Image (spheres, helix red, strand yellow):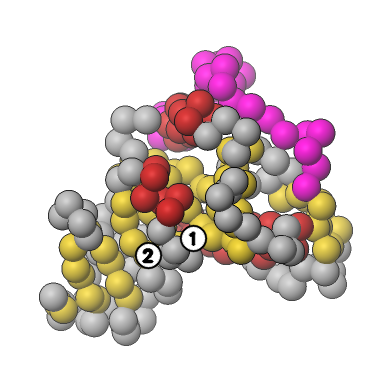
Amino acid sequence: MTVKLPLAKHPLGPFELTGIGVTTHQGGYPVAVLTEGRPSPTVHFKRRALPVSWAIPRWDRAVSRRAGPNGQVRQLKELSEAQRRGLRYEAAVTARLEGELEGQFISQLPFEFRTELTISTAIPDGIILSVEKPEVIVVEIKVSHSADALAQLEFYRGIVAAAFRLRRVRMLAIVQMCEPWTRLPRKFDVVNELSDALHQENEYLVLVWRRP
């Protein structure tokens, strides 16, 4: 079904909704497809993807959050309640992934990388190293699906691809909430099972875990 709507107000900013194709995935879960229009969501993530000449995963610096967020939250009292909620959700998702994908999911793995401008470090929320096929999935964990999630995943994808040159790199946002009309400059499919996220071939997937 294709809907045509006038200029709309949205938490990410105003934009035209003309030409959004909204269909349903198996089980009735929504799939939002951007077919045309001029989205202008606000992106707070400031780092931008640049060509990467080389990247190295620093396995010695990987961080597990299995222990939970309580100590971390107590040390960061200046954070807002929304930010604390995000930390709690990220810790819960990380613990579940480490349990269900032991040996495949690596949390907070730093990557050193070089662009034409500088040598720097990037730390995605996590990566999943497939044992079934030559593939890496870059994971970003958010309470709500947003343009920031995509911006961060796009940034990390180029770095991870430079570090794992013989593997295909896909992107996965794991969120607690996802509005099917979220406007992004890239098509995304919504799934609600980790197995679907692992076995589908889509370049960008959104996995909704309301209660990780």
- Type of the residue with mark 2: Phe
Q: Are marks 2 and 1 in contact (CB under 8 Å)?
A: yes
Residue 89 rendering spot, x and y as whole percentages = 43, 31
Instruction: Find the magenta span and give its range.
Output: 57-85
Image check: 198 left or right of 30? right
Label 2 residue SS: strand
Provide the residue designation for mark 2: 188
What x and y, as percent, mark residue 50?
71, 71
Residue at 56%, 50% (x, y): give it: 132
Q: Nearer the viewer, mark 2 or mark 1?
A: 2
Choose between 4 and 95: the one closer to the eye.
95
Residue 35 in the image: above or below residue 115? below
Q: Which quadrant of the view contains residue 116? A: bottom right
Q: Is residue 54 left or right of residue 23?
A: right
Residue 98 or residue 143, whichever sits in front = 98
Relative side of 182 to 200, left or right: left
Q: Earlier in the sequence, mark 2 or mark 1?
A: 1
Judged left or right of residue 115, residue 186 is left
